[in-house]
Image (cartoon, helix red, strand yellow):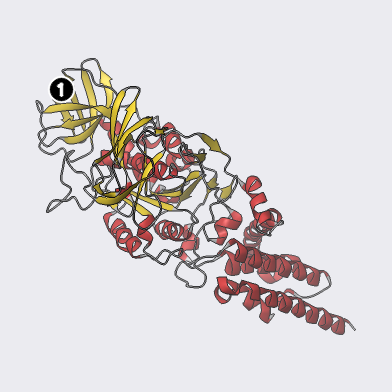
Amino acid sequence: MSKARIRWIGGPVLKARTEGPFHVHEAIAVGAQRLLGEVIQLDGDLIVAQVYEDTTGLKPGDPVEGTGAALSVSLGPGILGHIFDGLLRPLGAVTEHWFEPGLGVRRNQEFDFTPCAAAGDSLAPGQPFGEVAGHGPGRLCLVPPDVSGRIVSIASAGRHAEDEIVLVLETPAGERKLAMQHDWPVRRPRPVAARLLADAPMVTGQRILDTLFPVARGGRAALPGGFGTGKTVLQESLAKWCDTDIIVYVGCGERGNEMAEVLDELPELEDPRTGRPLMERTVIIANTSNMPVAAREASIYTAITVAEYFRDQGLHVALMADSTSRWAEALREVSGRLGELPGESGYPAYLASRLADFYERASRVTPLAGGEGSVTVIGAVSPPAGDFSEPVTSHTKRYVRSFWGLDRSRAQARFYPAIHPLSSYAEDVDTLARWWQLQGNPDWKSHRRRLLTLLEQQARLERMARIVGKDALPAEQQLTLLCADLVNEGFLRQSAFSPADRYCSPRRQTAMLKLMMRFMDLAEEAIAQGAAPDDIAAMPVLRSLQRLGEEYPEDRVDEMTAVAAVVESAFSRLARQETANAG
């Protein structure tokens, strides 16, 4: 192993004079405590490295030792259902005050292992060779993606430690011993057999997202919003209700009290699929703002590597990153200590490329082992003062396909989810329209376009109404405002705390949307025949439409046909009344 001696150190960054060869991104052990670090620059016989732990006490002359391998994390069945720091070290491995420092922190769990191959079999890269017992998906033991060979020996069924040797392969490079877990570099995407078109949505259960701004399974979405706009609550709702097999939640540089709330609530949530704890199919990576800044930068890559590991088992994974703004601030701090020339707002010039590296690892793929898997990335952004033109938000928009802009004024009005329909967008609508057709809604795309047009007209007319008064507007424009209010209250507003309305299936969304469209069609016909907007606003059925989400949960979707009949009857009575008045 190569060695070096610290020459200069400032915070998480150090320079060391080498006594052997090092390579960029090589993991290193620093000082007597063997603190984990990574080489980020080479300059002749000097290396520049960042240290992922507290560097207090380090001094010039302290030893630096290369590991010969890139910065990696151990991937195995022991990561599912647990909480880790940004370097995938279990939170249970703590001293009286904090994490036990150094490279010695390892998982020591035991599992009931069952082999699915036998001696003499050939294993290709990424193939499973066994599985472990336990609740939840993601329990396969995989051959590393860069290893293949013939099985020399494999452990029999029984209880084994996660890092115990259970498989010996004969490879072209010699004999290779494998445990249930294996290491993989966090900055290197795991290879796949093929990338597939993301042509189906990741159903979130949130009407404003699934209907107006859907994200494809294997796609990328950004969730920008200022303080107090509901980013964390929305991500928790998505974690509980989205139709994925595995949830990876990374709290990157968030405030300690917010992260403590997540760590307290997520393990207590019930999985609506199984009735068991949601934590059984969740991995939480906690890296609060008071942890070493360099570890914050690494936590994003750790999370996406964990997500790819489960994707390679043929599972669909949702990665919630909260928030990439704190990650970018870590980049900026380390870049400043390196003396690099700053770019926009002091961020390094390579901010855009680093964001691209992260978001491009989202995908729908055929894994090496066959089948289908995906990683859908939802990255929260915390723009200062809610300014969407700041560098992190503006660069993120270049790499995502769905943009869910949270609005402070809607949040202050207690309108949740506080996603502003006029500052948000989705680019996969044309691709996903076929999926909605198969769900029984061939008009989804036209209905979506009509809703967005209606909401845009509402914004314009409300500005006019503030000047001339609502009553001075023509009847058609008053009806536009009435229908927009109905859509906002009856369709887009959705409470995460409502037992009936916290989740809305595509089937229920379709039924509600068709009712809204029918009401608007009949209202427009009534106005054209001389009805007054106030008469339409006074209809009792309007109140029923505003409360569709609360009054008709998933087990009562079929009863909405009765509401449709009431709507038809109400407008028939209104038409007869107008005819009688005219006579």
- 538 shown above or below 115: below
Q: Is residue 263 above or below residue 299?
A: below
Q: Is residue 115 visible?
A: yes
| Percent x, y of residue 455 | 63, 59
Q: Is residue 101 left or right of residue 500?
A: left
Quadrant location, the C terminus: bottom right
Give the x, y percent position of residue 362: 47, 41
Q: Residue at x 16, y 27 (%)?
A: 65
User: Which element type, helix, strand or loop, lies under badge 1?
Assistant: strand
Q: Residue type at mark 1: give it.
A: Ala
Residue hosting label 1: 4
* Residue at x 63%, y 69% (from the top left corner): 486
| Residue depicted at 30% across the width and 56% down the height | 259
Is disc 1 surrounded by few (<14), some (14 to 19) or many (20+) residues within 10 Å?
many
571 or 462: nearer the eye?
A: 571
Q: Is residue 247 left or right of residue 28?
A: right
Q: Is residue 473 visible?
A: no
Q: Residue at x 41, y 41 (%)?
A: 308
